[in-house]
Image (cartoon, rainbow, N blue to C red):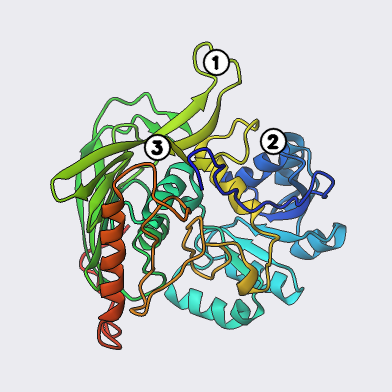
Amino acid sequence: MSVNDAAPALPSDATSAAARPARVGVVGSGWRAEFYLRMARLMPERSRITAVVTRTAERGDQVRAAWGVPTVRTVADLLALERPDYVVMAVPWDVTPVATGELVRSDMPVLAETPPAPDLTGLRELWSVVGPSGLVQVAEHSPFMPAHAARAAVLQVGVIGEVTQVQISSTHMYHAMALVRSMLGVGLGPVEITARRFTGRLVDPQTKDGWTDDPSPKEAGTTLGLLDFGGGRSAVYDFTDNQWHNPLRVNRLLVRGSHGEILDDRVTRWVDTRTVVTSHLVRRQVGVEQDLEGFDLDHISFDGRVVYRNPFQGARLADDDVAVAALMAARTTGWRSPSTRPPGVGRWCGRSGSPGPATRGADGRPSRPAHGLGSTGPRSYGEVSHHERLRDLARRRRSNPPSPGAGAQRQIRWSGAPT
């Protein structure tokens, strides 16, 4: 693979220009459901909404007027009107298991918004009902965000060596954990968690509904968590109430490895015994100043090589919408068969989000190639000796795996009240 080679494309729901759009049903009409309605409106060649289930006829009239799609009151009516390829479940946590079970009994694939049940007991009960069907996927979109996908591409080829720690202050709970687990490569393994909650005064100038015009500080909670996944892998979780919308709390992401670290978009790494270099993930945003292409994300590059390319150029999507569109694009591919699912999607309770297939060494840990972004030769950045040393390190680790069952008895433990 050369520097000028195109980045691997995300899976698509349209295999050719003549392929029909995916038929998508939606249960729920709130803020999260609107993400899917918006994607269908902006990219009608990719998906079409068959109908939206709303609780009342009044709400149905509002949705029909705003989005121009049919509305019904029940899941049975949704399936009878026009059978979709899959149904998005975007309802309150406690409602999701009931509606999901009903759809699975009708042999209908379900894309459930996170989380698919309100608690651990509910998750286990839901799994006992729908798990064996292979029809339910969880819509964890965070790893599909362009910046995270670009970081994953850099991590996958071993630029910072073996990833050992992730520190995240950005999004909350399951979204943060999806990113942590995918970047550490720990899959669904056990974890020991210690957490505490603190409160402090903070101005909250903006919420989901817009600017508050309130200059007074108010009590805001912050949850700090330490996560031990075993095998030298750990994470730090830091989230403040309303951090998604409050511009006074910026995103921070630190990924540490054996040979360097990624701090937001800055990559510092070891090259040889006397050389450490720093490079940046560079975002090409078109439509700025005299660029007349229209405001859009083109690609993200690293040391002159494209590591992420926006597959939805022309739709003018925010990053969060790009992630939702990528999630929808992957839904109709190999739904029932885990062996044919796109990398990082279609797994119960989360996915890796990696842009390529996950392979593991003899020690059970993810094996990341130490050369090029998917290439068979040295990258255009770093020295060959650096990559040879990483390969030697990986070979030594595989030849000396940890004792069987190590860490298998780790228990989940909370200290304090998580959000």
Q: Residues within 10 Å of mark 2 (few under 14, many from 20)?
A: some
What residue type is disc 2 on?
A: Leu
Across and down, in percent, residue 9 comes to: 60, 48
Residue at 61 percent across and 41 percent down: it is 311
**Residue at mark 1 to residue at mark 3: CA–CA distance:** 29 Å
What residue type is disc 1 on?
A: Asp
Across and down, in percent, residue 214 comes to: 33, 26
* Residue 162 at least partly seen: no
Mark 1 near mark 3, Cβ–Cβ under 8 Å? Answer: no
The circle on residue 61 is: none
Residue at 23 percent across and 48 percent down: it is 271
**Secondary structure under the numbered disc 2 in the rendered image:** helix
Nearest to viewer (mark 2 / mark 1): 1
**Residue at mark 3 to residue at mark 2: CA–CA distance:** 24 Å
Residue at 56 percent across and 58 percent down: it is 139
Residue wearing tag 2: 42
Across and down, in percent, residue 172 comes to: 37, 52
Mark 3 near mark 2, Cβ–Cβ under 8 Å? Answer: no
Residue wearing tag 3: 245
Residue at 66 percent across and 57 percent down: it is 88
N-term-proximal mark, 3 vs 2 = 2
Please identify the quarter of the rendering in which residue 92 is found: bottom right
What residue type is disc 3 on?
A: His
Q: Nearer the viewer, residue 257 or 419?
A: 257
**Secondary structure under the numbered disc 1 in the rendered image:** loop
Q: Residues within 10 Å of mark 3 (few under 14, many from 20)?
A: some
Across and down, in percent, residue 78 comes to: 79, 59
N-term-proximal mark, 1 vs 3 = 3
**Residue at mark 2 to residue at mark 1: CA–CA distance:** 22 Å
Left or right for 415, reference 245 = left
**Secondary structure under the numbered disc 3 in the rendered image:** loop
The circle on residue 291 is: 1
